[in-house]
Structures are given as structure tokens and as C-alpha cells.
Image (cartoon, helix red, strand yellow):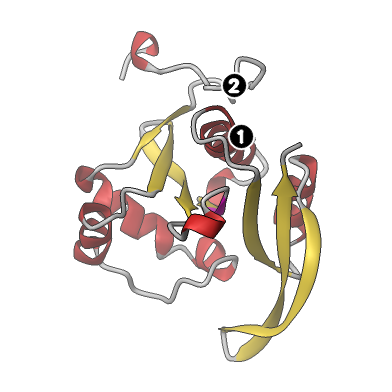
Amino acid sequence: MSGLDIPPPLDPDARWPEGLSIRARTPADAEEIAALHNLSGYRYGTLRTPHHTPDEIRNGIEGHSANSFSLVAELDGHIVGDCGLTRFANHRRAHAGSIGMGVHDAYRCRGVGRALVGEILAIADRWLNLKRIELTVYTDNEPALGLYRNFGFEVEGHLKTFGFRDGRYVDAYSMARLRT
């Protein structure tokens, strides 16, 4: 992809790392996304289990809901992160959605997560008019907690034994950002 093909951030104030592009994921991305999801560091911060296949990922991409938006971040010719937003379908919750994301182990702390969250929140704010965005994050994931706090997310609850990870139960925080 040439520099002219990289779409600018939806938020005109956003600043992405040099060479980063963010776009919608496609079925053709399945192999690279499966490799991303199978990285130990990526998986450690999510609810994903080991050994996802490209076919599983492709089926998820092809069967996504109309209420879902899934993005990938590309840098150095590879997918280095992904992020998704699901708008709740229930009429009484149509003002809200949830997000989830992850970044390639070798690309952490380089602005990829910040760019992905910023872009997905721009969709939520500037295109869907969502008032509330929710997420869960493991209590020991300090980098993610800092990232989310920088975007205005606040802890709303402590979820004990939320997930089972690498042989033990771990807690998570329920966080949300309310747009005024």
C-alpha cells in the first residue's frame, strides 16, 4: 500500500505512528489475524484460547453482525493489532457498545493500541452517536488500564475469577466511558 492509499484517522486530532494504517478487516486477513491471536502475549491479555486457525478467524469475519465493526492495524507490511466494536442490538441498549482489542507482542508501546482505540471510538462517537462504551480488562494488565484511562474509561466494577488463564483464575475490571 502506498502512502497515498493510507486513509487518514477519522478524528482529525489523532496522531498515528509513521506508516501505520487502520482499515476494516477482510476474509483475506484470516491467516495473519490467526497468527496474531496465537501470540502468547496477545492471548494473555484477552479471553482467547490457544491455537486458533485461519478458518476459524475467516468464519468469524464472514459471519460478523451488522452491529459490529472490526479493524486491523498494519505496519511494516503486517497486521500488528486488531480492534472491534459491537453496538448492542437491544433497543434499550442501542446507545451503548463494547470494544475489545489486542496488539502484536513485538509492537506494544509503539502507539498501535492508542491508534486503534482512537479510531474505534471515532466510529462510536462521530458515526454511531454512542453514549456509552464498555470493556473488560484483566486487573493485572497495567498497560491496557493506562491506555483505557487515557481515553476516559473508568472502572465500574471488579469481576472476581472473571477468566481462566494459563491454569488459574484471574480478576477483571468492568470499565466504561460515557460521552457527555
Task: Look at the image and say whether residue 97 sits in the magenta stretch.
Answer: yes
Front-most of residues 149 and 81 = 149
* Residue type pointed to by label 1: Gly
User: Residue placed at 80% from the left, 61% from the top?
Assistant: 155
Quarter-of-image position of residue 71: top left
User: Residue placed at 56% from the left, 63% from the top?
Assistant: 41
Query: Disc 2 to disc 1, how far (Cα)?
Result: 8 Å
The image shows residue 101 at horizontal and vertical percentages of: 53, 53
Callout 1: helix, strand or loop? Answer: helix
Tag 2: Cα neighbours inside 10 Å, few (<14), some, or many (≥20)?
some
Q: Is residue 137 left or right of residue 149?
A: left
Front-most of residues 18 and 57 = 57
- Residue at image mark 2: 11
The part of the chain drawn in magenta is 96-101
The image shows residue 149 at horizontal and vertical percentages of: 79, 48
Disc sitting over residue 31 in the figure? none
Callout 2: helix, strand or loop? Answer: loop
Front-most of residues 111 and 162 = 162
Tag 1: Cα neighbours inside 10 Å, few (<14), some, or many (≥20)?
many
Quarter-of-image position of residue 45: bottom right
Whether residue 156 is situated above or below residue 171 in the rendered picture: above
Whether residue 18 is situated above or below residue 73 in the rendered picture: above
Q: Is residue 175 left or right of residue 104?
A: right
Confirm or deny contact between disc 2 and disc 1 (CB under 8 A).
Answer: yes
Q: Quadrant of the C terminus?
A: top right
Q: Quadrant of the N terminus?
A: top left
Task: Look at the image and say whether residue 136 sits in the magenta stretch.
Answer: no
* Residue type pointed to by label 2: Asp
- Residue at image mark 1: 118
User: Residue placed at 63% from the left, 90% from the top?
Assistant: 168
The image shows residue 124 at horizontal and vertical percentages of: 55, 38
